[in-house]
Image: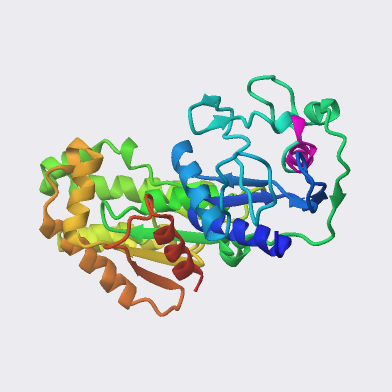
């Protein structure tokens, strides 16, 4: 009902804002009303990536429908409506609950569902019938005529053009959430993800037990490992990925070493660092996630790495000061400092989108 195309576009925008990132949108098709006499419908299919559970997805899309003017009737009869959002597939999940059935039980009888789905991914397999979408489309008893529209829906993802940057480094203190953010951005934008290999460092647990003894071998091992990783992953760019997202920047080595090493050792370390890293590419955008010390300690405790539980607030404050000092001395406008102390970007999509906007601003 109403401006049908604008209603579809509004629904797509709300799905992006509240449910997840949009991978692909099909063409829009006009089809006759099914099950009642009425004006023709516009239909499309949208492929999303989401972290939400099925029950939360359903609750969210019902709220989106209501926001866009949908009023559900109690009689369950088919009528015209401003918008109707259905869940067709959730990966290969088979779900039968009182409120939600997945895959959608009527999908095989609906050409206006199958045709757009075939555009998105013709190789999708129905987890119950084990038939792909093309076969279901060929076998459907629905003989409705579909008219493909010349106008395409716009994907809101285009307003978050992360792919214009070849190399983004996400930095932050211990427990700030840099790895989680880097992984989420890489997944949403098909970027190559580089994660620091701290788990493989045998000196890290020993350092937290005896910093004075193990600081130098720890920093040297990190120096070598980070250098080798960046040589392997950044200089050999993946042609099938549009960007590289790393959860650290090479200068992290200098920042940590300046705090953990005595002056003479740090002087030697700095010379080695400068020799090794002079030819490595620099990030197009350097993002520093600021998190207050209290939240950092909470996050460290929550993630439960045994060797980190002895980290003191004073050490985290020194690291933050080291990062800020490094940033102050950089003569570039590609550094973004984002205060996430009041954000929950893994739980609240609105917070995640705020961060993306600040990165591309």
Q: Which residues are magenta?
A: 109-118
Above/below status of 283 relative to 31 = below
The answer to whether residue 230 of the structure is visible from this angle is no
> Which is nearer the eye, 213 or 330?
330
> Which is nearer the eye, 34 or 300?
34
Residue 150 x, y percent position in the rendering = 84, 60
Locate residue 14 relative to residue 139 in the image: left or right. Answer: left
Locate residue 112 relative to residue 92 in the image: left or right. Answer: right
Count of marks placed on residues: 0
Quarter assignment of residue 257: bottom left
Q: Tell me the quadrant of the picture where the N terminus can be found.
A: bottom right
Residue 239 x, y percent position in the rendering = 67, 50
> Which is nearer the eye, 359 or 73?
73
Above/below status of 217 relative to 245 = above
Locate residue 68 relative to residue 7 in the image: left or right. Answer: left
Name the magenta segment's main secondary structure: helix
Q: Residue at x 77, y 41 (%)?
A: 34
Q: Residue at x 78, y 50 (%)?
A: 38
Residue 84 x, y percent position in the rendering = 63, 49
Q: Residue at x 30, y 38 (%)?
A: 201
The answer to whether residue 65 of the structure is visible from this angle is yes
> Which is nearer the eye, 271 or 116?
116
Q: Residue furthest top?
A: 129
Q: Residue at x 68, y 64 (%)?
A: 6
Magenta span includes 358: no
What kind of colouring is applied to the model shown?
rainbow
Residue 153 x, y percent position in the rendering = 71, 60
């Amino acid at each position: 009902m109403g401006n049908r195309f604008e209603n579809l576009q509004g629904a797509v925008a709300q799905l992006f804002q509240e449910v997840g990132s949009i991978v692909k949108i099909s063409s829009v098709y006009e089809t006759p009303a099914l099950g009642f006499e009425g004006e023709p419908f516009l239909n499309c299919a949208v492929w999303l990536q989401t972290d939400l559970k099925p029950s939360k997805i359903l609750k969210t899309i019902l709220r989106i429908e209501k926001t866009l003017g949908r009023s559900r009737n109690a009689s369950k009869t088919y009528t015209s409506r401003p918008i109707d959002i259905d869940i067709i597939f959730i990966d290969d999940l088979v779900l039968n609950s009182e409120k939600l059935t997945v895959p959608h039980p009527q999908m095989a009888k609906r050409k206006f569902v199958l045709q757009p789905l075939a555009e998105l991914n013709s190789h999708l397999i129905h987890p119950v019938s084990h038939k792909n979408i093309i076969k279901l489309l060929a076998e459907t008893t629905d003989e409705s005529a579909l008219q493909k529209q010349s106008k395409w829906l716009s994907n809101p993802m285009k307003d978050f053009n992360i792919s214009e940057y070849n190399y983004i480094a996400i930095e932050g203190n211990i427990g700030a959430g840099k790895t989680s953010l880097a992984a989420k951005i890489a997944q949403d934008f098909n970027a190559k993800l580089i994660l620091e290999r701290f788990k493989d460092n045998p000196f890290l647990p020993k350092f937290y037990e005896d910093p004075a003894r193990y600081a130098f071998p720890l920093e040297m091992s990190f120096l070598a490992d980070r250098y080798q990783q960046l040589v392997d992953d950044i200089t050999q760019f993946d042609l099938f990925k549009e960007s590289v997202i790393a959860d650290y920047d090479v200068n992290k080595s200098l920042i940590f070493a300046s705090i953990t090493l005595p002056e003479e050792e740090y002087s030697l370390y700095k010379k080695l660092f400068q020799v090794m890293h002079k030819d490595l590419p620099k990030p197009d955008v350097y993002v520093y996630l600021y998190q207050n010390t209290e939240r950092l300690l909470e996050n460290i405790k929550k993630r439960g790495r045994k060797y980190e539980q002895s980290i003191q607030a004073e050490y985290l404050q020194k690291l933050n000061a080291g990062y800020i000092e490094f940033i102050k001395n950089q003569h570039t406008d590609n550094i973004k400092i984002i205060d996430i102390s009041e954000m929950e970007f893994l739980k609240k999509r609105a917070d995640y989108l705020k961060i993306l906007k600040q990165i591309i601003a």
